[in-house]
Image (cartoon, rainbow, N blue to C red):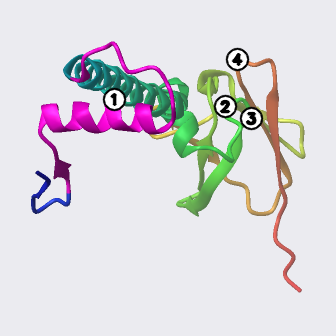
Amino acid sequence: MLRKNKKKFYYMNMDQANETLQNVFAACEKAPNTVPFDKLVLRQKLNTRIYDRLIILTAFLLLISFSSPLAVTPVNAAFNRNRDLSKITVDSDYEADGILYLNLIGDSILYDQAYQITADGIKEFPVSYDEKCSTICFPYHPDKEVNIYIPSSYEQSFHLLVTPMDEN
């Protein structure tokens, strides 16, 4: 007797299912089934359990594969994708009380070796610098052209030319 539950699964008595299977083999003129029907059902359940576990394992491995680049990417590179940290760039600058303040972006900047050369050929070292804030301060000469050199440990030196503003 067939019964229908709420999930639309149909259940059949094992003896009736075995008899129906034997009738199908007889109608197709094939040899009768020698394996008991309850063993066929158990084998099918075992196979679906293995497949279910393999599908879960495959989904887990795919999740790990797709998320593995996140574990390899350094944190700095994730936030500074468009910035090459081996090169020094000026993030912002301002002048106050005769001092030129430069906020820099870059890695391995050698603040203590930075200097500027005025148009007169006078070499001046920074008034101060703060490595944590990436800020360096030089004497400001509004009427002179100044070349600022900031070296880095990558054997590159950042050259900044500061020229007086044209009064026109």
Q: Which element carries disc 3, helix, strand or loop?
A: loop
Residue at position x 11%, y 39% in the image: 13
Q: Which element carries disc 1, helix, strand or loop?
A: helix
Residue 47, image quadrant: top left
Labels 4 and 3: the sequence-earlier one: 3
Q: Which amino acid does label 3 sit on?
A: Lys
Labels 1 and 4: the sequence-earlier one: 1
Nearest the camera: 158 or 4?
4
Q: What residue type is labelled 4?
A: Ser
> What's the CA distance linking mark 1 and mark 3?
52 Å
> What's the CA distance linking mark 4 and mark 3?
10 Å
Residue that protrudes farthest toward the top in the picture: 34
For the question of whether residue 80 can be seen, the reply is yes
Labels 1 and 3: the sequence-earlier one: 1
**The stretch drawn in magenta includes residue 20:** yes
Q: Which element carries disc 4, helix, strand or loop?
A: loop
The reply to whether callout 2 and callout 1 are in contact (CB within 8 Å) is no
Residue at position x 62%, y 28% in the image: 107
- Name the mark nearer the viewer: 4 or 3: 3
Q: Does residue 119 appear left or right of residue 75 in this picture?
A: right
Q: Which mark is residue 87?
A: 3
Labels 2 and 4: the sequence-earlier one: 2
Nearest the camera: 9 or 79?
9
Labels 2 and 1: the sequence-earlier one: 1
For label 1, the residue is 52
Give the extent of the magenta segment: 9-37
For label 4, the residue is 153
Q: Which amino acid does label 1 sit on?
A: Asp
The reply to whether callout 4 and callout 3 are in contact (CB within 8 Å) is no
Is disc 3 surrounded by few (<14), some (14 to 19) or many (20+) residues within 10 Å? some
